[in-house]
Every structure is written in C-alpha cells, then in structure tokens.
C-alpha cells in the first residue's frame, strides 16, 4: 500500500511540473497536492480504524452465534441479520453485511473443531451449515461493492471521487493557464478554483473525524466490562454528520436505495474498465484476501515438496499454509481452500477441516 502511495505522489508531482501555470496557480496546485496526499493518508488510517471496529463486532457476533447453537430456530437468516444489526447499532460499527455474517458462521465452525468431537460436533456443524445456506439463498444479487464490504466501498469510493476531482482540477488549471494568457478578463475568475483544495481539506477533515469516532468506539467496547466506567468518556456520543462525514456515513447507512442505485452507480463506473479487478473487489474482505493470496502463493511450493517427501509434515511452512487457507475459507467460503486444507491435512495427519467438508457434501447430497 505504501509503495502504491509513493508511486501516485511521484506521478502527481510530474504532472504538476509540466503544467504551464502562473505563480498563483502553482501555489494553488501545490497546496492541492499536499491536501490530496493528506486525504489519502487519513483515508487509509481511518479505514484501518473502521476495520478494527468491524472485527470487534464480528467477534461479538461469533460469541452470540456460539451461544445459540442449542436453539437452531434462533439461527435463521432473519434472526442473524437482526442480531448483526443490533450489534452494529450498539457498537457504532460499520454495517455487517451478509458476507460478514457468513464469515462469522464459518469462523464459529472452525472454533467448534477445538471443543467438540463426533456426533456433537456434526450436529452443530449441520446447524451452522443450514444457517449459511439460508443466508446464501436470500442474499441480494447486487453488483455493488457496498453490498459485500462497506469498508472496501468506503476506501474505493473516496479514492474514486478524489481522483475525479483531481483530474477535473488539472483540466481547469490548464484551461485557465492557457486562457488567461490570451484573455486577461478571465484572471479574476481563477479564484473560484480555490474551491478544489477546500474539497481536499474537508475530505481529510472528515477522515480524521471518522477515524477518531471509530477509535473511540473500539477502545470503549474492547475494554473489559468492569473497566467500562473508567473509559466511559471514550464512548462516541454522536453519530456522523451526513454532509460533513459523507463517505463515513455510507459505511453505517441502511439506505440501500441511495447506496446501491444512486451513489454506487456513480463511483463504481471507472472500475468497469478493469473488469477482472472490478470483479475481485466485489468480495468481502478484498484487501485482506489480496494480502493473504500474496503470502500463500510461495507456500504452495512447500506443500508440493512435502508431498514428494522432501519436507516434513510438521514444518512451519505447512502450518502457515494451513492458517492462511483457513482464513481464506472463512472470508470467501470457496471450496478450493477446503480442498487445499484437506491436502495439507493428509500431510500433517489432522482431521480438523475434513468434518466441515463432510457436512458440506451431506448438505449438497
């Protein structure tokens, strides 16, 4: 991520150096570049804060799902969505989408492997599998990033808008620089362009507010219950202001019509020109999945060496591969990661994920 930011900044500086602008335009453009970089940096930081709070909300959801295993009627899709919505409101967290709920269910399934064996384990896995299938069957089939992961939508939508504003500024700065050299009466209107750096400043300010809000909520809800009174001042007392905190507001908004049919259509348009990347972003936990896949690819070599007997089955690389495949299965639910886990289990002698695969096959049959 940091390398990508440096490349973007270098490209922006090259563009700025090639613009035929006067002193006022150069100052304005330089300030805009600084504020744009500040907006991106505060966006990344606030995104991390929001993701930490969402993970804490998912942890709370997993514990409540675990408690409900003995009463399957409380693990219907409607019940789980209501539960996730209540946790979101209680903790002021980003919306827990259907994909986030599915991640929590799969995570609970893995935790059960540590606590139960035999018929008791299979009975609980079947309850979770039924809940997961019901959520999948009722999920909205929308090609909208916000429908899958609100934090990914928060990051990508703001980056898209910042990019559009910056390209618009380049066009206007160039037009005024060339036009004022021929038409001097245009010079007074150049002050209007100061609105553009103001947009960057307001965006950065909104990101700082969002990060502060999510950090406060995280500190309050992550504190033990007996210490809550000591950190009560950390609890957020107000929600976002829609106009000032526009991007952060969409993270916790339940106005699906605006979110998907109006706002999503606008900011997702530029990504249509990169269809493969566009499809990959429409998944829950896109940035984490991308990071895990980069770590996983070189580890497959160690799995192949272990198959050939050139590497012991208890090696650290195999354990790392097992951990990453497990996490990828939690995030995506893709069968290929279960298949990879079974292949690793044959080398390590474990049966942790074979039970989950057996339940999936029984449900499919």
Image (cartoon, rainbow, N blue to C red):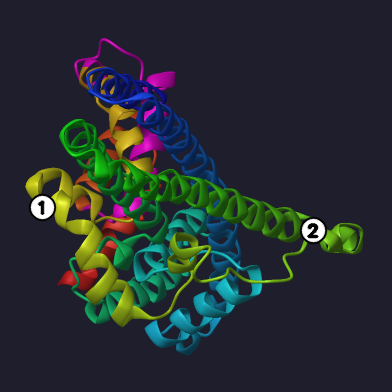
The N terminus sits in image quarter: top left
Q: CA distance from mark 2 to mark 1?
A: 41 Å
Name the mark on residue 26. none
Looking at the picture, tell me which residue is in the foreground, 71 or 355. 71
Direction from residue 274 to residue 253 in the image, left or right: right
Res 114 seen here: no
Question: Magenta residues?
Answer: 305-334
Label 1 Cα neighbours within 10 Å, binned few <14 / some 14-19 / many ≥20: few
- Please report the residue visible at 89 percent of the width from the left and 62 percent of the height from the top: 226
Q: Is residue 19 above or below residue 360?
A: above
Label 2 Cα neighbours within 10 Å, binned few <14 / some 14-19 / many ≥20: some
| Label located before the other in sequence (2 or 1) | 2
- Please report the residue visible at 29 percent of the width from the left and 53 percent of the height from the top: 332
The C terminus sits in image quarter: bottom left
Q: Which residue is mark 1?
A: 272
Res 99 seen here: yes
Looking at the picture, tell me which residue is in the foreground, 39 or 177. 177
Q: Is residue 132 above or below residue 222?
A: below
Q: Secondary structure at mark 2?
A: helix
331 inside magenta stretch:
yes
Q: Main secondary structure of the magenta part?
A: helix
Q: Secondary structure at mark 1?
A: helix
Farthest residue toward the top? Answer: 310
Q: Position of residue 282 (x, y in %)?
A: 23, 56
Q: Which residue is mark 2?
A: 234
The image quadrant of residue 364 is bottom left
Q: Position of residue 218 (x, y in %)?
A: 67, 55
269 inside magenta stretch:
no
Q: Position of residue 41 (x, y in %)?
A: 49, 36
- Please report the residue visible at 88 percent of the width from the left and 58 percent of the height from the top: 227
């Amino acid at each position: 991520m940091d390398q990508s930011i440096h490349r973007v900044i270098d490209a922006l500086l090259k563009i700025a150096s090639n613009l035929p602008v006067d002193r006022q335009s150069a100052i304005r453009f330089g300030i805009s570049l600084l504020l744009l970089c500040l907006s991106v940096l505060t966006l990344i930081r606030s995104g991390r804060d929001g993701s930490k709070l969402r993970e804490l909300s998912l942890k709370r959801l997993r514990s409540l799902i675990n408690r409900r295993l003995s009463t399957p009627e409380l693990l219907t899709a409607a019940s789980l969505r209501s539960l996730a919505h209540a946790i979101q409101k209680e903790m002021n967290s980003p919306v827990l989408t259907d994909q986030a709920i599915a991640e929590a269910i799969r995570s609970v399934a893995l935790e059960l492997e540590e606590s139960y064996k035999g018929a008791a384990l299979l009975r609980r896995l079947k309850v979770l599998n039924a809940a997961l299938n019901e959520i999948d069957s009722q999920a909205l089939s929308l090609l909208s990033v916000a429908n899958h992961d609100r934090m990914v939508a928060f990051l990508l939508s703001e980056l898209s808008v910042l990019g559009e504003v910056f390209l618009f500024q380049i066009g206007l700065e160039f037009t005024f620089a060339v036009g004022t050299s021929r038409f001097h009466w245009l010079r007074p209107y150049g002050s209007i362009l100061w609105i553009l750096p103001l947009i960057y400043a307001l965006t950065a300010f909104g990101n700082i507010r969002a990060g502060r809000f999510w950090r406060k909520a995280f500190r309050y809800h992550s504190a033990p219950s007996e210490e809550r009174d000591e950190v009560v001042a950390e609890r957020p007392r107000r929600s976002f202001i829609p106009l000032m905190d526009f991007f952060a507001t969409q993270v916790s908004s339940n106005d699906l019509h605006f979110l998907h049919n109006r706002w999503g259509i606008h900011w997702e348009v530029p990504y249509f020109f990169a269809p493969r990347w566009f499809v990959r972003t429409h998944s829950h936990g896109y940035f984490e999945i991308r990071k895990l896949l980069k770590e996983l690819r070189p580890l497959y070599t160690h799995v192949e060496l272990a198959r050939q007997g050139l590497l012991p089955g208890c090696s650290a690389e195999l354990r790392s591969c097992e951990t990453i495949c497990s996490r990828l299965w939690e995030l995506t639910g893709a069968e290929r990661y279960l298949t990879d886990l079974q292949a690793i289990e044959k080398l390590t002698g474990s049966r942790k994920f074979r039970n989950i695969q057996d339940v999936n096959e029984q449900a499919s049959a």
